[in-house]
Image: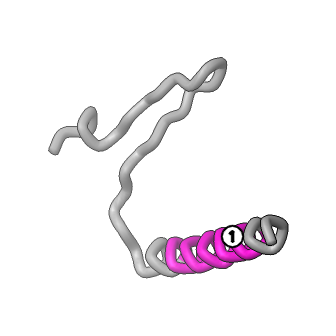
Amino acid sequence: MDRSEQDATERVGPLEMRVEVAAATPESEQRWERRSESLAAWLLGEWQRDRKEAA
């Protein structure tokens, strides 16, 4: 895969976002694991709050 297929630049309104793909490392895997756990906990809390407010 050449670099143009690995990287992407996207314009969203006034913002320009660039995403670059890098090789995974043990540290990056741990960071993504922590991020996914944090996101799941936040989503669960939001869902529980919404259900409580709807009751």
Q: Label 1 sits on what residue type?
A: Trp
State the residue at coordinates (51%, 72%): 32
- From the viewer's side, name the closer residue of 38 and 1: 38
Furthest-left residue in this view? 1
Depth check: 38 or 7 in front?
A: 38
Which residue is label 1 attached to? 47
When asked about the image quadrant of residue 3, the answer is: top left
Name the spot of residue 13 as percent of width and height, x first: 62, 20
The image quadrant that residue 44 belongs to is bottom right
Residue in the picture at 35% in, 39% down: 7
Q: Is residue 35 left or right of residue 54?
A: left
Q: Is residue 12 magenta-colored?
A: no
What secondary structure is found at the residue carrying circle 1? helix
User: Relative to residue 7, is residue 55 drawn left or right?
Assistant: right
**Residue 17, relative to residue 44: is it above or below?**
above
Q: Is most of the magenta stretch helix, strand or loop? A: helix
> For residue 51, which quarter of the picture?
bottom right
Please tell me whether residue 14 is drawn above or below residue 5 in the rendered image: above
- Where the C terminus falls, by quadrant? bottom right
Residue 10: x %, y % from top left? 46, 28
14 or 45: nearer the viewer: 45
Percent x, y of residue 14:
65, 19
Q: Please report the bounds of the magenta region as a residue range.
A: 31-49
Asked whether 45 falls inside the magenta stretch, the response is yes
